[in-house]
Image (tube, helix red, strand yellow):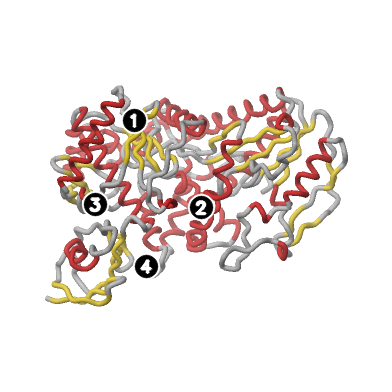
Amino acid sequence: MEIKINIAGVGEVAATRGTSLFEISEKYADKRERPALIAKMNNELHDLSRPVLYDSNIEFLDITSSQGYRAYQRGVSFLMVYAAKIVFGAKARVVIAHSINKNLCCEMPEFELTEEKIAEIEAVMRDVVARDLPIEKTAMPKELALRTCEELGLHDKISLLKYRHNQTFSFYKLDRMYNYFYGEMPPRTGRLSEFKLSKRTRGFVLQFPSASQNYEFTELAPEGRLSEVFAEANRWARIMKTDTVGALNDKLCARGNGEIIRIAEALHEKKIALLADRITQEHRPIVLIAGPSSSGKTTFATRLGIQLNVTGATPHVISLDNYYRNREDCPKDANGNYDFETIDALDTAQITADLKALLAGESVEIPSFNFYSGRREYKGNFIKLSDTDVLILEGIHGLNDRIGGDISPNDKFKIFISSLTQINIDDHNRIPTTDARLMRRMVRDFLFRGASAETTLDMWPRVLLGEIKYIYPCQDNADAFFNSALVYEMCVLKQYAEPLLFNIAPSSPHYPEARRLIKFLSAFLGVPGETIPSNSIMREFVGGSCFAH
C-alpha cells in the first residue's frame, strides 16, 4: 500500500507503507552536509528505525537542531560506555557525572584512568565508528529488562526501572552490548565521528562539537572552581546514596521524605552560614550575587542576610532590577524588542555612583522599578552604611565588572549561584542543569506570573543565549560559588509541572519538548510540597515562602 509523506525541505513523496524512516532518510534526506540522526514525524520525535504506517509530515533532524544534538550526545555516550567496557570489562562501572559547556565529565570509580587507558578507549570508539555498526532498538518486557541489567552489572538501571509503570522498555543494542538510554538514538555509529576524550583529575571529558562555534571543537578551559563545586555535589550525593533517581526513590521508600529534605536543607543552611562568617571576617561591606535564571538568587540573598545578622552585621538586600533604565531608554535587540538581558538595560553608572557614596559614609536613596509603568521610582528609601552594615545586591549581572568595577576588590565579596544538579537519572543519563532550572522557571511563571508552560518554553532559548553571552563569562570573577540545587526538588516540581506539560497540544511546536520533559519527570516518585520548609529556596518557585518575593 502506498502512502504520501511530506518531507521538510523536500516536499511530498510517495512511499510503501511500513518503510522505515531510515530508508526514507537514505533516499531523500541524507544528500545534505550532515546526516540525519532522528526524525520528527507528525510532531513526535522518533528513532529512524520507526516504520511509517500512514500519511505523515516528516522532518529529519541532524546535529544542528537541539533535539538532534541531544541524540548525538546520547549516541556518542553509548559509544564511549561500550568502548570503556571493552577496555576494562563488561561489568566495569562507567559514570557520566555531569556536564560543563555541553561536554560530559566521565569517571570510572573502580579504575585508575591514565592517559594511555583513555587513549585506548578513544581508539576503540573510532574503530567502531569506522565499522559503521547499527544501533538497534529492541523492546523488552520488564522482567527481561531487569534480568538483562543484572547480567550486565547495570544496577543503577535496575533501581530506575523498577519504579516505572511501563511493562516494556526500549533498550539499545550496539554489537553485543545492551543499554538503556533516555531518549532517541542515532541509527548507526558511522554518524558519530566527531568527539574527543581529554584526561582530567577525576576521569576524562567527552567533548562534542560546539553549536556556538559552527560545530567545531573549542579548547577546554582548565579545571576550575566550578568543577570543584560539581565534584563536591557528586561526592555528597554518593555519601547520601542519592546520586541517581533510582537510588533517591529507594531512599524515599525506605526512609520517607522527611530525612532527605532536612539533610538537603541543612546543607544549604551550613553553606550560607559559612559564607556569612567569611564576609564578616574579611570586613566586606558590599556583597554582589549573580547567577542564571531560576537559581534562587532572591531567597539566597535573604537567607544570607539572616546569617549576617547572626554574626552581628546589619544587612540591606537590594535587587539590581531596581536600577533598570526607564523603558524608553532600554536597548533593543536585532528584532526591535526591548532587550532586558543585556547589562546595558541597567544604569550601571548610577549603581556605581551610589555604591561609592555609600562607602564614603553618605546617605543614598535607593530606587525601585515599576514594571507596570516601566519607570524607575524614588520613594524615600534611604540607606547609610555603618561599620557593621553590609549591602547585598543580587541580579543576573551582579559579577560584571561594569558594576562597581573601580571600587576596591577588598570592599566587595562576589558570589556566583547556580543550580548544579547533583543527581543523574542513572550512570549514563545525566540531568542537564538547564532542565532543572527550566522546571523551576516554568512552575514559578505559571503560579506567580500568569504565564503558560508554552510561554516559558518559547522564551527559554533566548534566556539561555543571554546567560551564555552575559552571565557565565563573569563567573570566574566570583570569590565563592553556591550550589542551590536540592536533591529532592524534582520530586516536588513534578506535581506542579506535569499538568502544565500535559496541557500542551500535539499541534504545538513545543509538544516534542513537553513529551521529553514528561518522560523525564515520570522517573521520580512524588513528594508533597507541604513538607518543604518555609525558608527553602524551593519556596521561591512553588510558593509558601516566609520571605516576601
Disc with the residue nearer the chain's start (1 vs 4): 1
Which residue does the image show at 23% across and 74% down from the upper left?
Answer: 5
Task: Say which residue label 2 marks.
Answer: 464
The Cα–Cα distance between marks 1 and 3, rounded to whole angstroms, is 25 Å
Q: Residues within 10 Å of mark 2 (few under 14, many from 20)?
A: some
Name the mark nearer the viewer: 1 or 4. 1
Question: Is the C-beta separation of discs 1 and 2 under 8 Å?
Answer: no
Eye-nearest disc, 2 or 4:
2
N-term mark: 1 or 3:
1
Q: Amino acid at mark 3?
A: Arg
Neighbour class for label 3 at 10 Å: few (<14), some, many (≥20)? many
Residue 402 visible? The answer is yes
Q: Between residues 289 and 446, which one lies in front from this camera angle? A: 289
Report the residue that reaches farthest toward the right. 362
Toward which corner of the image does residue 102 lie, by quadrant?
Answer: top left
Task: Report which residue position mark 1 lands on.
Answer: 107
Q: Earlier in the sequence, mark 2 or mark 4?
A: 2
The location of residue 427, given as percent across then percent down, is: 32, 36
Instruction: Name the residue rendered at 49%, 60% in the picture.
Output: 453
Q: Secondary structure at mark 4?
A: loop
**CA gap, disc 1 and disc 4:** 39 Å
The total of numbered circles placed on residues is 4
Amino acid type, residue under disc 4 in the picture: Pro
Residue 191, numbered label: 3
Secondary element under disc 2, as helix, strand or loop, is: helix
Which comes sooner in the sequence, label 3 or label 2? 3
For the residue carrying disc 4, how many other residues have a C-alpha within 10 Å: few (<14), some (14-19), or many (20+)?
Answer: some
Query: For the point 61% across and 36% down, which residue is it?
Result: 477
Mark 4 vs mark 3: in front? 3
Q: Which residue is mark 4?
A: 506
Amino acid type indicated by mark 1: Glu
Give the CA distance from mark 1 to mark 2: 27 Å
